[in-house]
Image: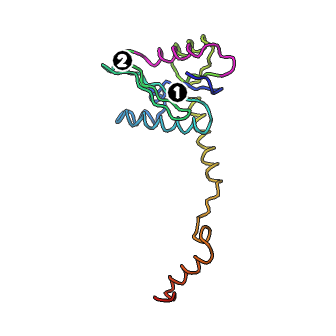
Amino acid sequence: MKKKFTDYLIVDGYNVINSWANLNDVAKENLEGAREKLNFILGEYASFSGIYTIVVYDAYRVKGHAKREEEIANFKIVYTKEKQTADSYIEKLITEFGPKKHFNIRVASDDMAEQQMVLGKGGSRITTRELKIEVERSTSKIKTTTKNIKTDKNTLEDVVDIDVLEKLEQIRKGILKGN
């Protein structure tokens, strides 16, 4: 992994889905839908915050599943390979980062064993509740920012030469020669 960012957030995807009520409700009916919703939320958060965000879903019990990754800008989705937990993938990832002198790594999970491992390797932990609060603040800022963007409508008068505009008006009125 290239270390071009200063802040990294690694999220245990299923841990978050199970702890956020809105995602847990969706997951009861449609696990894929819950993943897509979390991916959208975290992708938007990563884009707005500038934090390189990695969400990890384990395929521990999915027979024959190969590791799969999707990456867009500073947001990455990882599905682990068969028999690999999200915890073990996250531990390996943090180890690959090496000494953390010029960047920060946070891991979002409520799993105490995972939190202890993260702290032992020099990272910091954030609970899923703290992540939810952080994401909600970010979403609120996004809404405020986009609400303040001026949304003037473009009209023909803004983009067309005055002579062309006058001819178009004459056509509209049906008084152009030859009509």
Relative height, residue 4 to residue 142 (above, below):
above
Q: Quadrant of the N terminus?
A: top right
In percent of width and height, residue 145 lies at 64, 48
Which region of the structure is painted magenta?
Answer: 84-103
At mark 1, the secondary structure is strand
State the residue in front, 149 or 31.
149
Pointer 1 local density, CA inside 10 Å: few below 14, some 14–19, many at least 20: many
x, y percent for residue 99: 64, 13
The residue at the point 61 percent across, 59 percent down is 151
Of residues 102 and 158, the one drawn nearer to the viewer in this rendering: 158
Mark 1 and mark 2 lie on one chain; the one further toward the N terminus is 1
- Give how far across and how far down residue 91 sits, in percent: 52, 14
Residues 4 and 114: in front is: 4
State the residue lying farthest toward the left. Answer: 63
Q: Which residue is mark 2?
A: 82
Q: Quadrant of residue 70?
A: top left
Q: Nearer the viewer, residue 175 or 32?
A: 175
| Quadrant the C terminus occupies | bottom left
Q: Is 111 one of the magenta-colored residues? A: no
Residue ID at (50%, 30%) = 76
The amino acid type, in three-letter code, at marker 2 is Glu
Q: Is residue 116 above or below residue 10?
A: above
Name the residue type under label 1: Ile
